Every structure is written in structure tokens, then in C-alpha cells.
Image (spheres, helix red, strand yellow):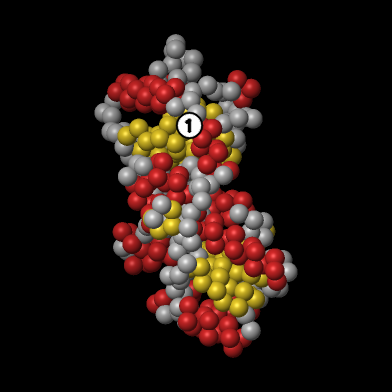
Amino acid sequence: MKIFRGLRHPGIAPGCALTIGNFDGVHRGHQAMLARLCSEAAQRGVPSCVLTFEPHPRDWFAAATGQPDLAPPRISALRDKLAELARCGVNQAVVLPFNAALAAMPAQDFIDDVLLKGLGARHVLVGDDFRFGARRAGDFALLQAAGARRGFDVARMPSYEVQGQRVSSTAVREALAAGDMAAAASLLGRPYAISGHVVHGRKLGRALAESAPGRLDGFRTLNLRFSRRACAWQPAASGIFAVRVSGLGSAPLPGVANLGVRPSLDAHDINGGRVLLETHVFDWPASLGPEGGYGKIICVELIWKLHEEKRYHSLAALAEGIARDDAQARAWFERHPAAAAAAAAAAAHPATGRI
């Protein structure tokens, strides 16, 4: 899949079958829409294209108005969203920076300047609740009327349901907030996962519960750190999880992870209050050596939630807490030996839903 930031790129196809949206999580409703989009594109002999936005429009409005509560927790960071769009067979993705100019753009200008002049849309597929333009003034009727005048097709995708529940990003966020990872996986069609580059931290974990002073063989962690920006990514899930980690070897590795802001550490911590995903794999691959994880791109699947983040008032108490989490996660994997295989199968063969 080709990825473009903004519209001013010579590599953008001159015509396309297009869908527009935030696609947070790329859940099963999105996947059904993308399958239809790819079919429509193939019939017309043009590439399929997704137009999406970064930051999320509600993130931008939250920062612009000083109302952080307006920003929704994010299911997926941009990297993971683009990876899922590619997995769904999309030919090109255009990431449009959401800013003051775009927020103020009238709906008709959005059609003329973005959809037609910028992307050469020949077919536009939107969801049943799609709105666009300044103050969300544009709707399906306006888009359909413009298509009739300007010669592009417009279609609307109805809601997608699984077991009578409408699949939406809101429903996924609610499942993740409740710690119901099985429900989230059912809505997503795969286990909830976060990926990124492993970065250096304080290397505190390896000194906790080390077998002997100086061995540094305690709880070695793989750290994924997220943005400091005003529109920073805030995940829809948080807490302590049993996880599977891909990207360190030929097979995924079980482990335990903390997703959050590390409330036990001081305000001068290198993390600086940012969201961090810290993952400890049970059996560190010897081939990597002690420093071999840094710089690698890993994918962490959050399979089962143990509990919320806890504050510990000493490093000794923190070490004891991590040891309990490690033991609890190991015990869970022992009780569910098929969990990892079932999770992978769910991603490869999602259950059928209804449109």
C-alpha cells in the first residue's frame, strides 16, 4: 500500500474509488466497508483509496479549545491503523493533517478541492453516519447531489452487526475500557494490539529482583513510548495484561505488560508522564543478548487483563508487585494453552457478521 501525507504528491493516483474516515481500530465494520471498496475499485479499474486524518479531528478540537475531555481514547496509533488498512487490501492511503484550515473548510470546498481536484474520486463510499466540512454541515445527500452534477458515484454502507450489536469504534473503546479483551477481539476481528519501535528507558526493571547484585537479569522490559504532543495518543486500554509479543523471533512470545503512565515512579522519570507500554517476555531470546531488543519493531497483543495500574511506594514493593503479575500471567497461559493459537486464528478467520 502506498502512503501519502497530504495531497501534493505526484505519486497519488489520478483517479480512485474512495472512502473517508478516521478508521480508528479498523474494526470489522471498517473491514466490511474496505472489502466493498476494493470490489468497487476493481470493477472500475482504479485503485482503492482511504482518506484519513491525523490527528483525529476530535483530538485537534480538544487541543484547540483547551477541552481535553473532547478527545476520545484512541484504539490504534497511526502505524497500526495503516498496517491494518494494508492488510485489508487498500491500494493507497492519504493521511490529511487535520488543522484549522481543514476544520473551517466548507463542505462544498471539501468536495471540490479534496475529493475531486486532490484525489480524482470516481466512486465515493461512506458510512451511514458520515458528515464532513465545517461544522459537519456536509452529509450524504449533499455528496450524492454533487456526484450527480460532477460525474462520480456515491454509495452508503449500512451498519455492520455482530450478534445483534452494531460494530463501532465507540463499542470497541467501551470493551477496552471495561477490560473485556475477548469482546474487543470479537469486534475487531483480531486481538487488540499495539506496535512500535523499542526504545531505551531507565533500565530499572532488569535491576529489580536480579538473581545477584550486578547481574541485571531481573524484569527486562521492551518499552514503547508515545507522543508528547498536545494531541498526544491516549490509548483506549490501560492496566496490566497477559500478552503475546511478535517481532523478536520466528514465533510470538508470551509475557506480561503494563500500559499506562507508571504511577509508582517519580515526576522526573524519563517517561515524563507519557503513555508507555512496558512488556516483559517470560523467556528472553538468548540470541538477542541483553541489548538486542532496542530499535526492533514489535507487536504486542493484549490478550487478558489482570488489573488496573497500581501505585507502589517503594522499589521493593514494586518488585513484589511485578513478580505477582508475572506469576499471574504465567498461570493464565498455563490454564489457557490454546489461547494464543485461538487469537491468531481469530485474526485469520474472523467470524461472520451481518450487514
Q: Residue at x 51, y 32 (%)?
A: 340
Q: Where is residue 95 in the image (x, y as percent from the top left)?
A: 57, 63
Q: In the image as oriented, which residue stretches furthest toward the top?
A: 212
Location of residue 302 (image quadrant): top left
Please name whichever residue, 265 or 226, is drawn nearer the observer in this view of the structure. 226
Residue 146 in view in this figure: yes
Residue 12 in view in this figure = no
Kindly state the secondary structure of the residue where label 1 is placed.
helix
Residue 319's place in the image compared with 68, above or below, is above
Pinpoint residue 113: horizontal percent, then vertical percent.
58, 79
Q: In the rendered view, does 75 fall on the left or right side of 41? A: left
Give the residue type at disc 1: Ala
The quarter of the displayed image where residue 181 is located: top left
Closest to the observer, 163 or 238: 163
Q: Which residue is drawn at 34% across and 67% down?
A: 65
| Residue at numbered disc 1 | 339
Q: In which quarter of the image is residue 155?
A: bottom right
Q: Where is residue 118 in the image (x, y as percent from the top left)?
A: 63, 75
